[in-house]
Amino acid sequence: MKNLSASTALLLSTLVSSRPLLAAGIDERINDVMAPVTSQAFKIVFFTVSFGEITIPFVLLWLIVAALGFTVYMGFVNVRGFRHAIDLVRGSYDSPDKQKGEVSHFQALTAALSATVGLGNIAGVAVAITLGGPGATFWMIFGGVFGMSSKFVECTLGVKYRKVNEDGSVSGGPMYYLSRGFAEKGLALPGKILAFFFALMCIGGSFGGGNMFQANQAFKQAVIATGGEQSLLYQQGWIFGVIMALLVGAVIIGGIKSIVRVTSRLVPVMVAIYVSASLFIIFSHLSLLPQAFASIVSGAFAPEAMYGGVVGVLIQGFKRAAFSNEAGIGSAPIAHAAVKTDEPVTEGFVALLEPFLDTVVICTMTALVIIISGLYVEQGMDGIALTSKAFEQVIFWFPYILSIAVLLFAFSTMISWSYYGLKAWTYIFGESLVSDVSYKLLFCVCIVLGSAMNLASVIDFTDAMIFAMSFPNVIGLYLLAPGVKRDLESYFDRLRQGQIRRYR
């Protein structure tokens, strides 16, 4: 490891020593151009509504109501379908017969998880606790549990209305169930308009949350691990971005099959590394756990004034939960649509595991580590820096391990979101080699931009694009949910009667 670090330092030194002032200038110019754009986009998407003295961004209310509504309407499918979802991921019901699609249930899950289990679980949780206090964790968990139902509905629809091309490749997601599903109900034009808007926002989301935020926080952690302001990387974000862009580009050229080959191996490894370190710290401070959970619950319902009251804490918790697990956003159905199955509902079951693993398990572990450390009350730390410092208090060498985990998280998220954005791009511009290459080049350019921008600008752009996707998506879910419910009850009936066979 020492030899590797030395050679890496030598390489970076060679790259940056000749033009340090120009490099710093590039970072500053990129940020100056992008900051006003991201600020305006944030204001448009996060407009607020008021109920007496309570003010809340409408988009969060939009997602909260949908998650609660689908949970009740689908008969708490997030609970009664949980065990069956695990069996499906294990392949217990995989038919040996040839089915349409490109990837297995497990591969589809890891591809979607690689997009959600990312820096939102590390940096995003830290942001939520910094702004909302420990109580934000409670609302993150709440959002994750009920978000499982939204994820079930949208991913079932993603398979139900997908487009299977002549070469066997699949295109799916909200673009297709909005256009095709609405057309079935005699609403072809509104469906096409909503599908176009979703695709446009999805492209922006792929450049923002699925790319720039990941690159930004990966670069920041790399700087921390290599010496902070004394690091050779300091203010050289664009160089870091170029290296990441080359690595990402090498994978995404091969499409979804290339992506799932990487994510099916990468996701279990990176989750194991991060969860193991989190559990080590938590079990090392078992005596502090009751106090940590007490602060989470009390902070959720009786927070200090500095955190903006109960509503302020709820907003921060739900915002980070939605950004982390993307339930109701409409991104995951694009990956799940590629699954090999003739039963759309089965992929809805598999998909509901995502918010549970992503938010209820991994985000909660991050939150507990930060709360136990007590560092969230200090000024001057946010995002990945806070999480890194919290881990470092117990494991002094952990920033180096976290750097590896962050790079893996960022890398896996970027390659999955490149697929989401590509499918949205080709929906608008058509499926062709020129369309494919042009999107992937733009995606790689955004990696460089994200590495050079500051965190506030990146988060504003990220939240604006990704949350805007939820407006057309949830409208589609409401209109098409009755069909999903009929499919769900039919599936459960056939499962109870033994018509659906268990093969393992």
Image (cartoon, rainbow, N blue to C red):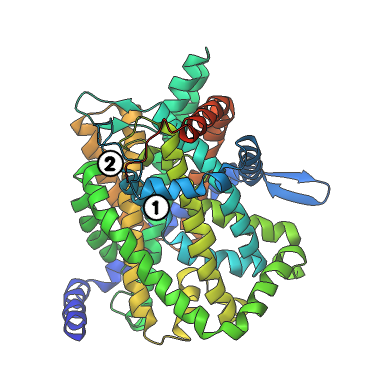
Instruction: Report the residue at 50% width, 42% height from top.
Output: 151
User: How far across and down, in percent of the image, does residue 315 sit?
Assistant: 65, 55
User: Horizontal placement of 68 versus 442: left or right?
Assistant: right
Distance Cα–Cα, label 2 vs label 1: 14 Å
Residue 113's tag is 1
Vertical order, 22 against 281 (above or below): above
Figure quadrant of the N terminus: bottom left
| Residue 422: % across, % down | 31, 38
Residue farthest toward the top in the current orientation of the protein: 186
Q: Which residue is mark 2?
A: 103
Q: Is residue 461 visible?
A: no
**Residue 350's x, y, as percent?**
43, 45
Q: Is residue 448 left or right of residue 15?
A: right
Circle 2: residue type: Val
Secondary structure of residue under mark 1: helix
Secondary structure of the residue carrying numbered label 2: loop
Residue 145 is labelled as none
